[in-house]
Amino acid sequence: MRLKQYLLVGSISALLIGLTACATPLPEHDVSPSYSMDVPAQGLLSTYMRQQPVDDLKKSGFYILDRGVDALSARLQLIDMTETTLDLQYYIYSGDVTGGLIAERILAAADRGVRVRILLDDIGNSMSDKAVATLDRHTNIELRLFNPVSMRNKWFKLPSKIVEFGRINNRMHNKLMVADNLAMITGGRNIGDEYYTLSERDFQDIDLLGIGPISQEASESFDAFWNSPLSIPASVVYENAKQGTLNRMRKGLASHRKRQAQKPYIQAMEDSSFSRSLIEGRLKLYWGHSDWLADPPSKADAHSPNSEDPYLARILGNHLLDVHSEVLMKSAYFIPGQRGVEALTGVVAQGADVSVLTNSLATTDVLAVHSSYAPYRVPLLKGGVKLWELQPMAAKQSRPNTFISESVASLHAKSFVFDRYKLFIGSINIDPRSIELNTEAGVMVYQKELSEQLADLFQRWTEDDYAFELRLGEGDRLEWHTKDQTWTSEPEAGRIRRFMSWMLDWLPIEDQL
């Protein structure tokens, strides 16, 4: 998903050396910086915080959002509870059912006086130019685009991407919402139906809701990106874009909400125990110390000496080396490379268990990623790493509570459990793009009960009904196992998928994936 709009460019990167040697400049702009506001003394979120049994003011409370219906409910409720300031930072924002529901709440928050800042990656964003320009017209809403393409006309956008490849190849992959500088949500989910069990591709994903000091840390990171030279105001990018009226947008979004209100998904969201607990202040949070971990925006700046510096990946690598007994990893896109294979098998050699869940050929949404991942499976297994790949029918199981009858599962989660006492949930995959090209972010939490919850979730997602277990058979031949069946070739993947994966394996694009 994250590569669909520019994978074609990456696939012919060898032909673009002359074009990518020099990075093209961003549009000229002159804007004043803005920063996070103080936590309001009064308000719903402040009251919510005061009601919590906090024994250490440096601790934050956390809740794992593994169900799409709860993840959307949490975002909508936070927006409704916001009193003063709301910040959103996303790689993808789609103009679909989910995007419309969130946009309507954002506009309502701005109408009641909340300052709203929205930072979207330009390549990932699929909201229409007209919608972006119209939202940005609101007195209390400011929208910026990260590292935008210069040519906005639909006929010139692809040529512009090719010419500007040296600059725009580095993206902002972060996912973050911060309300009143007091509550936040981060993890793997963008804004789009597929992340919330509302489309035929059902992304199995994980977010983390946090309340307390972690929100101020996340806000500082947001400010760094917001005030980065790479973040261009929508008014500059869409200078000549046709704009709609805010009243027309309000009416359209209100009609959209009313059409959705009677559908089973919305009713399930409103009736869920999570939604009721959050609204009534009864949600059980797990309190612990935490660290907000994020790449700096300069990682994506082709002109910066810190360009492509793997800051976040290096921190996670250090945590991996500290593992004593067990590490559990979910990575939607998993291309460990030779160094990654050596690191993971080295942890096994030191006496710890290493378990990885990723996509199968049948469930991946980026075939090129699977092609680059596939050669590392045998050396990982030979080195003692345990591997699972998601099944397409995982979307039919009770866990995700899918609302689309023909949905196919695809793993999108990015999470780590270290020795069952600390965990990380964020946006980073174990692949070259996340490690070196894109900016990434997430939260490290030092909390045993929450770590056990995430470990239990890993165990459920690797059961026979959800995933294939990979093993080595005779002659180190790969086998895929469930309790009742064994495969000796990529299970449940059609001939076309297998052929395309084989063809993509010939392209020299691993460092772009």
Image (spheres, rainbow, N blue to C red):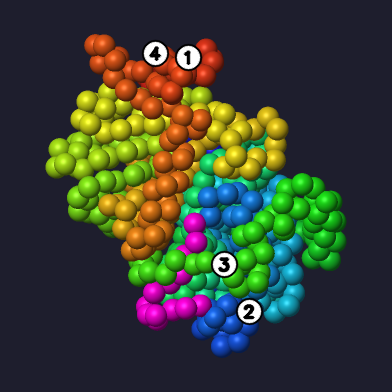
As shown in the figure, which amino acid type bears the numbered disc 2? Leu
105, above or below 408, in the image:
below
> Which residue is tagged 1?
499
As shown in the figure, which amino acid type bears the numbered disc 3? Leu
Asked if residue 111 can be seen in this view, the reply is yes
Q: Residue at x 63, y 83 (%)?
A: 43
Q: Residue at x 40, y 21 (%)?
A: 480
> Which residue is tagged 2?
44
Task: Give the image location of residue 338, x and y in percent.
Answer: 23, 33
Is residue 330 within the magenta segment? no
> Which residue is tagged 3?
283
Q: CA distance from mark 2 to mark 4?
A: 56 Å
As shown in the figure, which amino acid type bears the numbered disc 1? Phe
| Residue neighbourhood size for the residue with mark 4, other residues' Cα within 10 Å, grouped as few (<14), some (14–19), many (≥20) | some
Which region of the structure is painted magenta? 52-64
Q: Please say if the residues under marks 4 and 3 sit with CB atoms less than 8 Å apart.
A: no
Task: Give the image location of residue 297, x and y in percent.
Answer: 40, 60
Tag in front: 2 or 1 = 2
Q: Please say if the residues under marks 4 and 1 sit with CB atoms less than 8 Å apart.
A: no
Near-viewer residue (243 or 54): 54
167 vs 159, left or right, is: left
Image quarter hosting the C terminus:
top left
Q: Please say if the residues under marks 1 and 3 sit with CB atoms less than 8 Å apart.
A: no
As shown in the figure, which amino acid type bears the numbered disc 4? Thr
Q: Residue at x 70, y 40 (%)?
A: 403
Q: CA distance from mark 1 to mark 3?
A: 48 Å
Q: Earlier in the sequence, mark 4 or mark 1?
A: 4
471 vs 185, left or right, is: left
Q: Earlier in the sequence, mark 2 or mark 1?
A: 2
Image quarter hosting the N terminus:
top right
